[in-house]
Image (cartoon, rainbow, N blue to C red):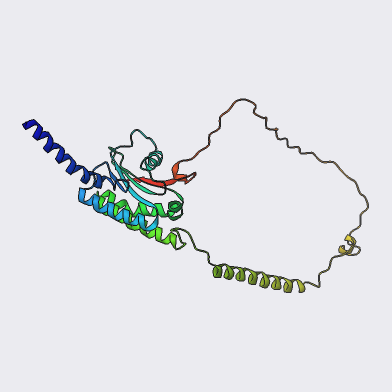
């Protein structure tokens, strides 16, 4: 009987704990702290902030911390796989790897909204601005600044000016066009003016007109062959044998779908 009561109490306890766990896990798409860099309260606050930024701009802004890259040699490939495994279709993922003697950070983004807002210059700027906090192990501030910068860059993009790009307005283009046409007109006028000052010099029909009379008297004319200089260049032979071809690029190239930038700290 006592055993039955104990099992009942255990079941009730589990049912009380499970909803709280599920609520906490619901924010894991925004913050996945596998390396345990944040306290529970810090993580909850960060989840709230990133969720707010994400909902405001229609794209995911996420953080992932790990203890290792699970055997990956290229952090860009690891970032792309984790991005997909977290179920992020459009967004940016900030990864901190605490792998022994190889602490790294990486920013990866994919999706139309994220790719437009987070240019390579913008992501590089985010990484540089957070570097000092990572070096000081100030994770809470680093992630808070990350959320703030993402919010700023997404707002800029919504206003038509993604970070690192120049907005070309109609007035600006017209000013440039007017300046170019004015320069061409002034240059043509000056050239025509200088050309008009050279009327004293006229071309002659015969070369004899350029010789001073009685200054040259030819008595004999003869053609002599002096030497011949021949330069030969071998024709390159076509290689018909087997060979190999390699083509490709890292994720830092921003080629293909997504792209990213990274560094050490």
Residue at x-position 32% and y-position 56%: 52
Q: Quadrant of the N terminus?
A: top left
Q: How many marks?
A: 0
Q: In x, y percent, where is residue 238?
A: 67, 30
Depth order, front residue of 232/73: 73
| Lateral position of residue 47 relative to residue 184, left or right | left
Q: Is residue 265 visible?
A: no
Residue that sits furthest to the left in the current view: 2
| Lateral position of residue 129 relative to residue 136, left or right | right
Q: Is residue 61 visible?
A: yes
Depth order, front residue of 21/171: 21
Q: In x, y percent, where is residue 50?
A: 31, 53
Q: Quadrant of residue 95?
A: top left
Q: In x, y percent, where is residue 6?
A: 9, 34
Residue that sits furthest to the right in the current view: 219
Residue at x-position 33% and y-position 37%: 69
Residue at x-position 60% and y-position 70%: 179
Q: In x, y percent, where is residue 253?
A: 47, 45
Depth order, front residue of 198/34: 34
Rendered view: 83 above or below 126: above
| Lateral position of residue 15 relative to residue 108, left or right | left
Q: Quadrant of residue 159?
A: bottom left
Q: Quadrant of residue 21?
A: top left
| Lateral position of residue 70 relative to residue 169, left or right | left
């Amino acid at each position: 009987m006592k055993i039955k009561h104990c099992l009942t109490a255990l079941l009730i306890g589990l049912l009380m704990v499970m909803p709280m766990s599920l609520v906490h896990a619901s924010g894991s798409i925004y913050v996945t702290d596998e390396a345990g860099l944040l306290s529970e309260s810090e993580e909850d606050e960060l989840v709230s902030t990133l969720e707010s930024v994400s909902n405001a701009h229609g794209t995911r802004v996420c953080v992932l911390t790990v203890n290792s890259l699970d055997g990956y040699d290229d952090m860009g490939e690891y970032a792309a796989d984790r991005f997909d495994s977290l179920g992020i279709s459009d967004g940016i993922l900030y990864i901190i790897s605490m792998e022994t003697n190889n602490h790294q950070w990486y920013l990866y983004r994919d999706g139309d909204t994220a790719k437009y807002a987070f240019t390579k210059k913008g992501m590089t700027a985010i990484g540089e601005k957070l570097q000092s906090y990572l070096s000081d192990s100030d994770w809470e501030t680093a992630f808070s600044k990350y959320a703030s910068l993402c919010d700023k860059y997404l707002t800029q993009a919504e206003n038509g000016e993604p970070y690192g790009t120049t907005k070309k307005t109609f007035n600006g283009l017209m000013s440039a066009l007017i300046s170019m046409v004015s320069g061409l007109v002034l240059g043509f006028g000056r050239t025509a003016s200088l050309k008009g000052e050279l009327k004293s010099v006229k071309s002659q029909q015969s070369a004899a007109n350029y010789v001073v009379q009685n200054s040259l008297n030819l008595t004999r004319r003869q053609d002599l062959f002096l030497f011949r200089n021949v330069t030969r260049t071998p024709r390159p032979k076509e290689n018909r044998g087997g060979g190999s071809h390699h083509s490709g690029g890292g994720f830092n190239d921003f080629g293909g779908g997504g792209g990213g930038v990274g560094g050490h700290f």
